[in-house]
Image (cartoon, rainbow, N blue to C red):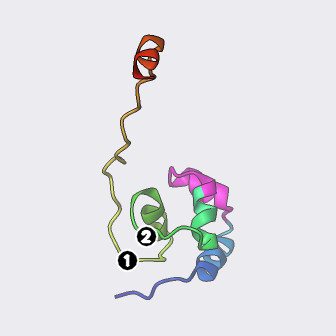
Amino acid sequence: MTTLRTKEEARAWLDYQGISISQWARENKVHHSLVREVLAGRKKCLRGMSHNIAVLLGMKHGEITTRPARVAPARRPVQASQAGAAA
């Protein structure tokens, strides 16, 4: 089993490769601000895209997830006639 990179080592690896965070994010089809959050340690990287970023950077063991994130259904706006009846 390979050793995991720390956030400092992952950032140094990008510098060694001569790749900016934004360029790495574009190449891996993730948002650069999320990569910065992961590298700063502000994300737990338990699931979703932050998990994928940490795996790709070698910061955690795991598999890349291809399952789409589940988003809560949008709430329907309350109609004026319903708002008056509820009051």
Say whether marks 2 and 1 touch (CB < 8 Å). Answer: yes
Near mark 1 (Cα within 10 A), the count class, few <14, some 14-19 or many ≥20, is some
Circle on res. 55: 2
Q: Is residue 62 above or below residue 49?
A: below
Tell me the residue at 43%/11% (across/down): 81
Residue 59 in the image: state x and y as whole percent: 48, 77
Give the CA separation, mark 2 to mark 1: 6 Å
Tell me the residue at 64%/81% (across/down): 8
Q: Is residue 46 above or below residue 24?
A: below
Near mark 2 (Cα within 10 A), the count class, few <14, some 14-19 or many ≥20, is some
Quadrant showing the C terminus:
top left
| Rendering quarter of residue 19 | bottom right
Does residue 31 belong to the magenta stretch? yes
Does residue 3 belong to the magenta stretch? no
**Which residue is label 1 attached to?**
61
Amino acid type at image mark 1: His
Boundaries of the magenta span: 19-33
- Main SS, magenta region, reads helix
Q: Is residue 5 above or below residue 77?
A: below
Residue 69 in the image: state x and y as whole percent: 37, 48
Residue 70 in the image: state x and y as whole percent: 34, 46
Q: Which of 83 and 46 is in front in this view?
A: 83
Tell me the residue at 48%/64% (across/down): 53
